[in-house]
Image (cartoon, rainbow, N blue to C red):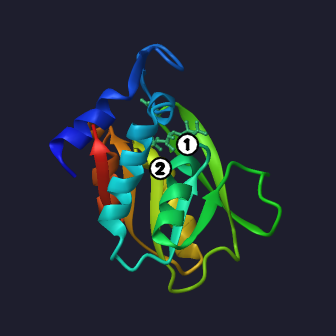
Amino acid sequence: ATAQQLQFIKDSIKTIPDYPKPGILFRDVTSLLENPLAYAASIELLVERYRDAGVTKVVGTEARGFLFGAPVALALGVGFVPVRKPGKLPRATLSEIYELEYGTDQLEIHTDAIVAGDKVLVVDDLLATGGTIEATAKLIRRLGGEVNDAAFIINLPELGGEARLNKQGIECYSLVC
Ligand code: PRP
Ligand code: ADE
């Protein structure tokens, strides 16, 4: 990744003050999605990083993780597995409760979507406290999948997510902060 490519991606992301509540600086990836060159560049940089990493599945977390995880999975030639908010998945599921920057939530995965030995790359739009991806990794590991890597478009380092995930044995890669 060149500094110029990363700056182009960063410049495409608008920051909205006081959304969804006062004091939050909301990094709005919908503005990146609206720019086809920035969207393509962000996917290409993630794919470049993991092309030869032996990944067998990509997991993306609802909702914005789908927008980046699914194209990365397609480009890597592996399956995409959605982790969803409660009650959305039709087959048997496992569930984890987690905390996020502004509230608590619950995530679910299909129990048959990960098989023992899967080498899973987790993709999301943004890393804040790391609670979402910690819960996602727990779901994958409960099913016997390996999670060594998580990739993001944006990292908010002051919220400590990277250190938290590193403690769980997960290496983080992000394009901008
Ligand atoms: C946002 C974002 C990440 C997560 C990051 O999702 O897309 O998934 O929060 O926060 P964390 O590192 O503190 O866990 P959100 O839960 O708002 O759901 P959405 O994508 O459905 O809007
Ligand atoms: N999810 C959690 N914190 C966020 C932030 N500051 N901007 C966008 N999405 C987020």
Quadrant of residue 83 in the image? Answer: bottom right
Amino acid type shown at disc 2: Asp
Query: With respect to residue 48, does 62 lie above or below?
Result: above
Left or right of 83: which side holds 23?
left
- The x and y percentages for residue 153 are 38, 45
Residue situated furthest left in the rendering: 3
Number of numbered markers = 2
- Front one among 45 and 27: 45
Q: Quadrant of the C terminus?
A: top left
Task: From the viewer's perspective, tell me whether residue 158 is left or right of residue 63.
Answer: left
Q: Residue at x 46, y 61 (%)?
A: 122
Check the image and report above or below for 133 versus 111.
Answer: above
Question: How would you rate the neighbour count of disc 1 (Cα within 10 Å): few for under 14, some for 14-19, many for 20 or more?
Answer: some
Residue 169 appears anywhere in the view: no
Asked if the residue at label 1 sits under 8 Å from ligand 1, the reply is: yes
Task: State the residue lying farthest toward the front.
Answer: 37
Residue marked by disc 2:
124
Label 2–label 1 contact, CB within 8 A:
yes
User: SS for tag 2?
Assistant: strand
Side (left or right) of 4 relative to 126: left
Q: Position of residue 125 (x, y in %)?
A: 45, 44
Residue 149: image quadrant is bottom left
Q: Which residue is mark 1?
A: 64
